[in-house]
Image (cartoon, grey):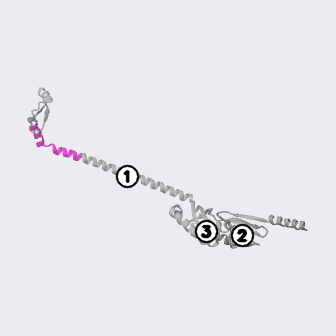
Amino acid sequence: MRKLILSLSIFLMVIALSGCGVAIVEDGQTGVKADFGKIKDQPLTTGWHWYLQIFTWIEIWNVKTQEIKETASVPSSEGLIAQLDVSVLYNVPKDKAVLLRKTIGSNYRETVLEPYVRESIRNVVSGYSVKALYSVEGRQEIGKKILEFLKSKLEERGVLIQDVLLRDVRLPLVFSQSIELKLKTEQEALQKEFELQKAKKDAEIAIARAEGTAKSNQIIANSVNENYLRYRWVEGLQSNEKQVVYVATEANLPIMEAGRWKDFSKG
């Protein structure tokens, strides 16, 4: 009898152990537990959690920041098609994981998140011109509007939207070409303006130099007058220099070197 009871106990223990499971909840995770198909309101904390697989199941949920990338071709307010690469940063708070599992399910990303991201891009971008998509300020405003839209739709469901980033905006070819032509024209205009200013400055410098030379010549001309030459003649007589002979003409002007005077007298 004893052997029978012992054998039965061992058999039941093996069955029980074979039906046991363990769930490990790590940092940045939480667990959603259900007994007999009913989800518990309290999420599981970090650590090891043993359970009977026959009656219980446990799902591990990521509560870290995650990224969803979306590429969409959407019309602008003018009807031109632009292609946007958008990143949405989000996470599921620990205290919202149970609500999200109950109301939507573990596939919430495909069920609500991605569709709302696509809808937000279409709705917001359609209200802006292609020119706004081209500018930094316009892109920032569009990202802000998409963020507000997603917050209003998803946070009450248990998904926390952290930020929206416009990674890239590809504009219609015809618009890109017109922008490039405009930039080229502006650069050429700036170059011509620079050359014009340089030419004006060079002309001002040339005029200033000419005026300086003219003033200098005028000063010299005004200085060399009849009284000055008479003064130099008298000064030369007083020094009794032999090298130079001062000849007072009727105009009291010529000053001749002695050597040239001799040559002149011989001739």
Viewer can see residue 80: no
Residue toward you, 104 or 181: 104
Picture layout, residue 139 above or below residue 217: below
Q: Does 245 sit left or right of 191 as displayed?
A: left
In the displayed structure, does residue 200 sit left or right of residue 146?
Answer: left
How far apart marks 2 and 1 lie (CA) works out to: 78 Å
Q: Secondary structure at mark 1?
A: helix
Determine the image quadrant of residue 104.
bottom right
Give the residue furthest to the front: 2
Q: Between label 3 and label 1, give the one nearer the viewer.
A: 3
How many badges with numbers are in the image? Answer: 3
Q: Mark 3 and mark 2: span between their CA atoms? A: 22 Å
Reading the image, the residue beneath label 3 is 160
Q: Looking at the picture, which amino acid does disc 1 mark?
A: Leu
Q: Which mark is residue 196?
A: 1
The amino acid pointed to by label 3 is: Leu
Judging from the image, what secondary structure is the residue with disc 3 in? strand
x then y, percent, for residue 232: 12, 39
Q: Main secondary structure of the magenta part?
A: helix
Q: Which residue is mark 2?
A: 33
Does residue 116 appear left or right of residue 226 in this picture? right
Between 2 and 192, the one lying in front of the other is 2
Is 230 in the magenta?
yes
Q: Report if the CB atoms under discs 3 and 1 are less than 8 Å apart.
A: no
The magenta segment is: 214-235
Between label 2 and label 1, give the one nearer the viewer: 2
Mark 2 and mark 1 lie on one chain; the one further toward the N terminus is 2
Rate crowding at label 2 as few (under 14), some (14 to 19) or many (20 or more) other CA atoms within 10 Å.
many
Query: Where is residue 169 shown, x and y percent of the image?
Result: 56, 60
Who comes first in sequence, dot 3 or dot 1?
3
Instruction: Bin the neighbour count of mark 3 within 10 Å (Cα to Cα): few under 14, some 14-19, many 20 and up.
Output: some
